[in-house]
Each structure stands twice: as structure tokens, then as C-alpha cells.
Amino acid sequence: MTQEMQEVTDVIPKEISALVDQGVQLRRDGKVQEALVVYKQAAAMSGAPGVVFFNLGNALMDSGNLVDARKAFEEALQRDPTMEPAALQLARCAVRMNDPKQARELFAQILKANPNHFTAWLEAGHLCRQLGIPAQALISYQRAVMVAPDRWEGVLSLARELEDAGRFEEAAAQYHRALPLASEKPGGIRQVHRLMSRYRLERGDTARALESMRQTLGMMRIEKPEPDVNERADVQIDLGEILMRLGLHEEAHRAFERASVATSETVLSRLAAQSFQNNLWVEAQEVLKRNVELHPNSAPAYWNLAHSYAESWMMEEAMEALAKAEAIAPQPGAKSMRASVAGRLGDADTAMRLYSELSEEEGPRSAMRSSAAMSSLYSDSLTAQEVAKLHRDLFAPLGQNARAASSFKNDRDPKKRLKLGMVSGDFHHQHPVNIFMQPVLARLDKTQFEVTIYHTGVSHDEQTQLARKRVDHWVSCATLTEVQLVRRIEADGIDILMDLAGHTSLQRVGMLAQRTAPVQATFLGYPGSTGVPNIDWMLADSVVVPQGAEALCTEQVMRLPNTVFCYAPEANYPFPKYNEEHAKRPLTFGSFNNVPKLTPHTLKLWAQVLKAVPDSRLLLKAPSFKDESAIKVFRERLEKEGVDASRLEFRGPVGLTDMMAEYADVDIALDPVPYNGGTTTLQAMWMGVPVVVKEGNNFVSRMGASFMRAAALPEWVAKDDAEYVQIAARMAQDRQSLLKLKQGLRDRQLALPAWNVDTYTRDMEKALRSMWTQFCKSK
């Protein structure tokens, strides 16, 4: 605890001092709620001096009540304007409450009164870093070092900022200067190396991060005191993350395994989070199970386990773990988790209602608004117009006081090489954004486009590394604040910023709503209009957004000449050998879509198909179906629609290559409504499985029609439910024609312009150039 964070207990009237002393001791013992009661009693007494409110503010900060903490510090300063610790805490409150303007003003006031205040200079530097003002951060760190040259924290912060500025020799001098300064603190030298490793990893400089990590590991062997099991484990987590980013996955897995011996709740929770980020789901759950065994009275331990179960589609287990967490202490995120579980079990309307309630409680910047919007796409009960209105209503406030496109200083030359930015956190194995974008990144004309990816993600694998090699610039920005990222994008001079996330996870739509680049577009990550102000364009095609449907979109529509998504997988998936045996086996319908798409309407429709095709079967495959409770739910729902359980087969998740091979077990795929299959539909066709689709009324419900029409198979597109059932029955009846189609379906795709990725990339380039040309002509 720094001097500025300690309690102030002097100059207190005798009638109040006993209460304050009691509160101080309670807070030191970790009994924050009890300390709050005592401090409030003291604050209510006549003549309570500023130090009482200062200590009250500290306890309120401990409890996470920043609003009341700020009021307490303000009251402390009212009673004693010279109380520097209260002024510093007030500035910290402003930082944590995302009020950078007030925070900067408060730091400035402190430094005006005391130009030699080391902590104020240091934390002002940290704030400038968060705000993306590197020059001011550098000055603040330099002043911190000047006023306290023996404090290693300031020296190391200066080294970090110098490295960020590319001044590596100067940075190295400060880095090495920090080491002897830290040696007076037990374990201080390894702490300096470890912090520098983390700083470098945040910047995306994995080679230098590994260099500092090696120094950390070396010092752990010789520096006293020796690290305990939890410090060793925490360092192994850092090492594992570095190795993952370097593509050394086996070595990273061994580091994570070494970390699993930890006993600390915090360290085990961090290990589980890192494991999840790197798709080690089973390992993460084992860590979390151990965590609750070691800490059976910890609500956060049970909460983390519940969250992991929900993410792994183990809904019954998730609800049990959540109940245990709530039995120990109230869980603010419980409603959000229940909404997530409802959505994953196909109850879109309940999920949407819960997310909407949370978004109202949390305000315009709530991430729950994106969750509510996403849930609406799955709803059987909303019309296309209602979905569009909901999106507009949810996100209109984000555009207030936005920057004008005309304010950007970019050179408006319609023929220049364009600086194209892409915002995404999804360049990793199996993610649809990665699958569709990798071939495009490989083919973009580098003489026409200078490409920068702003990577908001936390997962890194060989696909991440591949994407990084295919673009001109890669900015790791998972740890950047919105303000930092906005400043970085403007500093990079981006002409067109392409959002690849929409309202999915790791999105930054609030940033786009305030305008970050002169031209902004959304593509691929979200199947429809975002409703977000100041996103200028949406890439589409003439089927997903036909002429006359523009009113459903807040963006202008830029239509590609063929289909909006071009499936051109770079992995080799052997095509099944479809022979006469396939024509003789019981006909199998199938869907590999995630269960939120299996809405009541969809299940009723598929039940009608099964009734129309006697002796046919339905194969449902999804991550949820590794969970017996999920299988039970959907089996019962289909049985209520008149489907005998003997005609149903459920399969859980496997690796992508094995999943693709399983399409050989499906004769005809059934597209869900209203949220059509995207990647799954195209994967089915790639593996020789045609898809029955229904042409709906908005982007998300017309994707299947777009794909089948682009494949020159309009006869597979239904205009309503009745025709959907008729098409499925007719195609199932003519087994020889079906077999012939299956045998040549991949060849058909490869022969059509819609699936030529070179043509598709050129079409996309023309669309981007058209966006820029129109901007250049605008005032």
C-alpha cells in the first residue's frame, strides 16, 4: 500500500477518534462492510473533519461504490482543501469511472500545488497512455523520474513509453536502470522483468516479451526470497501466453500445465481464463473445478465455473454452479448469465427481454444492448421491421455529438492507395470471420490497399499468425481503451475502417458510432444492419438486401455482384465418395447449426418435413449436444411436434476436419429460420450436401437464399413454410437425382463466378474504392 492510499487518522476530535480507529482496523482486517458502518457513524457526527470522509471514501472504493466514494473525497476536500491524499483518490475515482477530463484536471491541480508529487506525475502518465496521448505520457513519466530518481516504478514506466515510441536504445538504458533500484525490494528484480514482459506483450512485441520473461525465470532461481507456488504458477501463465502467440503451442500447453499446481483462487481463475482464450476448454474447466474444491466458500469461484459451463454449452451444470454462487453472495451478472443460457437453449424472446432490461438499467453504453440486438435476430415473434426498429432504438444514443466525416484531414484523392483498417478479434481457428477473410487477405491488391488489422481479440493460434503475415500492419489492441484505439486509428491515417464484428463479442461499435475514420463500413461479422449511427456502408448482395429493402438498414447498402460471402476454404477437406449405397440408405436430413437457431418455428417446420418423408431421419449436431440435458430438451421439443425419438440423432462437437467429414452422413441439410445458417450452409454444400432454404424478409433470413441462388440452385429456395416442406419431400423422393447432385456439388461451386475468390476479392476492392470515391465527392 502506498503512502497516499493509507488511512489518515491524525487531527481527529476525541469524540470521533475511537470510531475512526475502529474503522481503520476493520478495513486493515479486510472487513470493508463493517468498516463502512463505523465510518458512516463518524461522518454523521457534528464536526467530523475531512479525514473521516477520506477514510470513508477509501472504504467505499474498496467496495466498488465509486459514485459515493467520489462524493466522500469531495466532502473531505471541502473540509480540508490541503488534503493531498483525498485529491489523489478523487483523481483515481475519475479514472476508474471513465471520466478522463476530470481526472486530468485533478492531477493538474495536485501538481500545481505540489510539483514534486511523484505519484501524481506517474498516474497522470498512465492516464495519458490510456487516452492515447504518448507525448504527454512521456513528459509525465520524465517528470516522475526527475522528482523521484530512486523510484523504479517511474523509471520502468519511462522505459515502457520509450519502447512504445520506438526509441529502443533509450528505453534499454531506463530498463536496466530500474533493475538495481528495485533490488532493495524482496523479489524486486524479477518483478521488473516480469512487468516489462507484460508491457511488451500488450504492445504485441512477443520476441522482446519472451526475452524479459527469460530474465524473470532466471531471477526466480537465484533471487531471494524464493517465489512461492502461486507466484511460479502466475509466471508460467505469462510464459504460456507468450508461447501461444509465437505459435509454440505444445510448449505453451506445458507452461499452463505447470501453472495448474497453484492454490490461489486468483491465479487459478486467471489460468482458466487464459486456457479458455486459447480453446483449452476441458483443461480450463478442470482448473475451475479444482478452484471450487480449494475455495468452497468463494462466490467468484463458483461464478467462474458457472460461466465456463455456460460457454461450453453445459446449461444444467451452469445453473447449478450459479445457484451455489448466489447462495454465498448476490451475483450482479446473474441475469446476464440466465439470458445467455435462455438464448443458447433456443428461447430468444426470454434472452432478448432479459438483455433489454439490463441495457435499460446500465444505460446507453451497456454491452447488453448488443446482446439484445443479437437475440432479436433469432426471434420467431418479431417482424423484419420490428428488428430494424429495435436496433435503431438501442443504438441511436451512441451517435450523439459524433465527429463529422468532413473533419478528417485525409487526402481526398479518389485514385490514391487507400489505408484500409479492419477491426476484429476473431482471427483464430474455426471462427467464421477467419475462415472467410483469410483468402481475401491473401489476395488484396497491396498496390491499391495498405491494410491494418486492429486486433481486439485475446485468442492467438497459427491462424492469427497467418493473418498477421498477410497484412501490412497489425495492432494488438485488446488492452487498449476506446479512446486509445480511436487516437491510434486516426494517427495511422485510416481512410476506410471496416468493422468485422457488429454486435458479436469483442466489438467496438461505440467507437464507430462516434466516428473513427472518414468512411466506415460493416461486413461479415454481423448478418444484417447494425443500427449503429455513423457506420456509412454495409456490404451485401441483391438477395440478402434486395432493392426496396434499404429502409431496414441504417447504413447505405453496397451490393456485391454475386453473393455477399464467398466460401473458399484453404484447408483440404476430402470430398466424400457418394455412391449407390448413399441412394439406398434411409434418407437423413441434417443441421449442424448452433442450438440458438433451433427456434420453436424451426423445430415445427422440420417436424413437418419428417412427417412428409416417412422413414427419414434427422441428425442434429451442435456444441450443446455434448450436454445430455440439452439433448433431452430438444428431443422432448421435437417429440411434442410428433417426431418419434428413434428418428433423431444428436452429436456433439469435434474438430473442424472431423466435422466436415460428418457431412457424408447427411443427404439433405435443412436451413433454420429466421436466423439462417451461414458458414454451416456453405460447408454443407462444399461437402456435397444441398440445403433446403426459406427466403425470409431481412438479411439474416435471406442468407440461405443468397447462397443457393449463387450456386444456381433456385429450385431449393422456398417462399414460405409450405413450399419448404414440399421442396424437401420432392428432393428426398428422387434419390438418383439427389445422388447426382451430391456427387458434383463441389465442382458446381468451383465452376461458378460466385465462388471464385479472386473475382470476389476484385469485386470487394471495387466496392471499397466506390465508397471512397463517393466520400471524395462529398462536401
Image (spheres, rainbow, N blue to C red):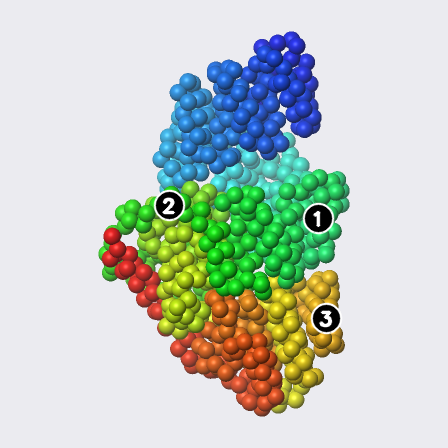
Q: CA distance from mark 1 to mark 3?
A: 30 Å
Q: Earlier in the sequence, mark 1 or mark 3?
A: 1
Q: Earlier in the sequence, mark 1 or mark 2?
A: 1
Q: CA distance from mark 1 to mark 2?
A: 40 Å
Mark 1 secondary-structure assignment: helix
Give the foreground label among 1 and 3. 3
* Nearer-the-camera pick, 764 or 167: 764
Question: Could you tell me the amino acid type at mark 2?
Answer: Ala
Residue at the spot of label 1: 322
Q: Earlier in the sequence, mark 3 or mark 2?
A: 2
Check the image and report above or below for 130 versus 22.
Answer: below
Where in the figure is residue 82, as x and y percent of width and height? 48, 15
Question: Could you tell me the amino acid type at mark 3?
Answer: Lys
Question: Could you tell me the amino acid type at mark 1?
Answer: Leu
Quarter of the image containing the N terminus? Answer: top right
Residue at the spot of label 3: 640
Label 1, residues with CA under 10 Å away: few <14, some 14-19, many ≥20: many
Check the image and report above or below for 574 versus 776.
Answer: below
Residue 600 sits in quarter: bottom right
Give the residue drawn at x 55%, y 31%: 67
Residue at the spot of label 2: 402
Mark 3 secondary-structure assignment: helix
Give the foreground label among 1 and 2. 2
